Amino acid sequence: MDVLRIRGGVPLSGVVSASGSKNAALPMMASCLLAEGPTILERVPNLVDVQTLGQLLTDLGCAVRTSQDGTLSIEVVEESSSEAEYELVRKMRASVCVLGPLLAKRGFARVSLPGGCQIGHRPIDLHLQGLSALGADIEIRNGSVVASAQKLRGARVTMSGPFGSSVTGTCNVMSAATLAHGKTSIEGAAQEPEVVALAEFLNAMGAKIEGAGTETIEIEGVEGLRGTEFTIIPDRIEAATLLIAGAITRGSLAVDDLCVSHLEAVLEVLSDIGVAVEATSSSSVRVDATGNSFRPLRVSAVPYPGVPTDVQAQLMAFLSTIRGQSSIRDQVFPDRFIHCAELNRMGASIQQFGNRAVIRGVDRLQGTHVMASDLRASAALVLAGLVAQGETVVRRIYHLDRGYEVLESKLRCVGADIERMDAADCMKPVQTEMRHSA
Ligand code: UD1
């Protein structure tokens, strides 16, 4: 099993590019089930999650072809199987995105229930309520959602739950409603850029969707959708992670090929902390943290356009290195704090109180062996390793590979001392050499 070995203390400098968005690509791939003819997606990140969904779509009768340049072609060639098995769904919760498209196009879907995960309890009740409001018969049978409908009917649906609106729930219901009879109104819709991108994609296929990006999305059902060509939006979470990498190492780093307007809340946080942040165009941001003095901060992770929960762990790593008391509240996933214990093993001082973590900044983090627990927690540990004194070994990086395309190569290109290796090759004791003072 692979690990990442990082020797901390090198301020990152130079330019690095963001990849296409995983969270935009996945629901778009699933929505290809709705269309007649081939769809070509460009700028698809080469990630394990994308491969997993590609495998699921193949099982569901699609011809899926990937090419080296990030182009993915998907065409439904056969509609006899509408069942998503546990083996694939357990690897990736976003597999649930096939539920709405299968139901709308084939009238039937059986999708294994995704279950819980390391970032907390993750129900899909809003997805199911939304699809039943469209007229689907839904039951839970032997651990799977079994949904059927001769023809979905437009309806008024709400997507807001106790922790905000569901992003993939909105995607599921919006996709299904494109082929429903009549008009659907999704209230309390998630407003994330990935939802807007999906609406634009579905419209390019012939759907009639308005209002994506606001809290009410209106969909007029159409008879059919056809394949199209579409370019995936930049990955705002990866871009934020790279910007924080520049800041945590006290470097000067530009990230290109991102979308500045998707990152406003994160840029504001970095600027409030004292990082010099400059948007040099609508697709490029430079952070400069050389010689700055930083302030602790209180941050809340909330739905878009606020600070994303998917950046919470990375910000926590950064705040751990800033003198004074900071706090982070996660209002989307209140239990998403497993990374605190691993950061504390690196010398951080973080205490969790319910959905809030209090962070007392330390002068330096120390390298050690740490264990990644989920995708964004892995990124936080890598960031901490980049600034820690000595050597950090991050284990279980299969979590990282689900959502970051060639992260270590990108970081190495801007100066990081980071390498991927077999776990067996890094069993020697961690070096305690003094290479850095944060
Ligand atoms: C998506 C993102 C994930 C991100 C999350 C929140 C993808 C593939 N994943 O996940 O990276 O962290 O949005 O921005 O896009 N909830 C319910 N009932 C439901 C569904 C959700 O109560 O039926 C709750 C969840 O437990 C959570 C909150 O609503 O507390 C938001 O979850 P949701 O937006 O659905 O997350 P995902 O779409 O799974």
Image (cartoon, helix red, strand yellow):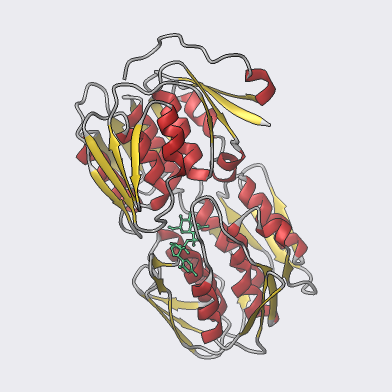
Q: Position of residue 115 (x, y in %)?
A: 60, 61
Instruction: Name the residue: 56% across, 63% down.
Output: 27
Residue 17 visible within the image = no
Q: Position of residue 156 (x, y in %)?
A: 43, 86
Q: Is residue 271 above or below residue 408?
A: below
Q: Is residue 191 left or right of residue 233?
A: left
Q: Nearer the viewer, residue 9 or 63?
A: 9
Looking at the image, residue 314 lies above or below residue 37 = above
* Marker count (numbered): 0
In which quadrant will I find the N terminus?
top right
Q: For the C terminus, give its image quadrant.
A: top left
Residue sitting nearer the eye, 430 or 7:
430
Residue 331 visible at all: yes
User: Residue 121: where, in percent of width, then height?
Assistant: 50, 60
Q: Nearer the viewer, residue 11 or 350?
A: 350
Which quadrant holds residue 13?
Answer: top left
Outermost residue toward the top? 433
Residue 19: x %, y % from top left: 50, 43
Q: Residue at x 34, y 37 (%)?
A: 350
For this view, does 81 lie left or right of residue 342?
right
Image vertical order of residue 13 relative to residue 380, above or below = above
